[in-house]
Amino acid sequence: MGTIRAELHQGKGVSFARRIYLPRTIGLGVGSVCVATALYPLPSTHWVWALLVLHAFVWPHLAWQWARRSANPYRAELRNMLCDSLAGGIWVGLMGISVLPSVAILAMMAMQNIAANGLRLMLQGLLANACGLLLCLLVLSPPIQFASTMLETYACLPLLVVYPIFIGWMGYKVALKLSEHKRILRQLSRTDSLTGLINHGSWKDLLQLEFSKARAVHRPCCVALIDIDHFKAINDEYGHLVGDAVLKTFSQTLRDNIRETDLAGRYGGDEFCVILPGTHLHQAVDVLERLRQVVDDYCDAQWPGLKVSLSIGIAPLESHITEAALWLNAADKALYRAKSTGRNRVVGASWETDHEQRMPASA
């Protein structure tokens, strides 16, 4: 279990490092223009320019490889971001603390830090900026030039325009991905994992909703409970894997043989349920009788001796039914009559025995 957690954590860390890789590459590339413009009029040695090229165009790729290959990519990438901030402070010092490029670079770094890991990383980044600046001033003693030239102003425009737009676009992509994940999670929370149908709790919520809507507009509606006959015997004789295959196959058959407006779910075990909005009892019987016949006629070449049949109870929404639970209970009583009178049949809750849809019980 510990190994699994470690692998999941490492995968999350690599994903985080990959998400920072492109913003770092673009940010350092565009930011190097600001730095180069500010350094140009200052007395700089060749090693400063070489360091600028390495930092802008080589470091992003080294940082990605370092984080990707680390035992803890997430922590490694956080260290990389603090190194970025430390280097940012050093470049501010080397530029002579020229106000406009310095503020632009520090602001863009703070933006990336807070977007990546919140206020804490932003504050740590600002502290690293200060340490880098202090280190540069103490060790290298660069000439101080607060005033920014017009050329430096123009050189900062790409960083001030392009980088925030890019960070906003990245944030938008993350928001879209989170929205899709939330949609999938909502769907999974409503769906039975084995059959893919609506699960018990969500179907009960839909039943209450359809009950209220039908009563409010006096619209006909039916609810049906479906039981796979002798399902325990199928499990005992063929095994639970075959039993699960029967449930999956029937679930797909159910979806294929009801109407688009009908709402099917797994009620529990081998019981299923269907809400048929805008449907009178005789119409519901027609729909579910066709379903019963399709299942009764089905034969699997892999298990030729396997016989599957359905018992189905249907209850229309009648005027004396004042609660959704009573409506469902009426369908349950109809299902009980279908099972107790031979199975493999459809029974309507308000019908007398001579109106019930009877089919020969399966052998």
Image: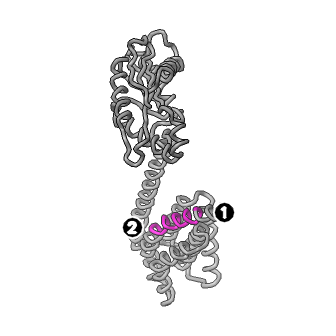
Task: Assign the C terminus to one quadrant of the image.
Answer: top left
Q: Looking at this view, is 235 or 276 the one in front?
A: 235
Q: Is residue 259 above or below residue 323?
A: below
Report the predominant secondary structure element of the magenta stretch. Answer: helix
Identify the residue at horizontal 41%, vertical 24% (top origin). Answer: 345
In the image, residue 12 lies in the stretch drawn in magenta: yes
Residue at coordinates 59% horizontally, 63% vertically from top-left?
A: 9
- Find the distance from the CA under tag 1 to the CA under tag 2: 47 Å
> In this picture, is 127 found above or below 258?
below
Q: Position of residue 17 (x, y in %)?
A: 52, 67
Q: How busy is the neighbourhood of tag 2: few (under 14 within 10 Å), some, or many (20 plus)?
A: some
Give percent across and percent down for residue 98: 51, 73
Which residue, given by chain and number where applicable, does mark 1 sit on?
A: 2
Q: Which mark is residue 158?
A: 2
Residue 266: percent from the left, percent from the top? 49, 35
Q: Amino acid at mark 1?
A: Gly
- Between circles 1 and 2, the one closer to the viewer is 1
Q: Is residue 81 left or right of residue 281?
A: right
Point 39% across, 67% down: residue: 158
Residue 240 drawn at (x, y percent): 53, 45
Q: Which residues are magenta?
A: 8-23
Secondary element at tag 2? helix
Q: What's under tag 2, amino acid-wise?
A: Pro
Which sits in the foreground, 38 or 60?
A: 60
Nearest the viewer among 94 and 352 is 352
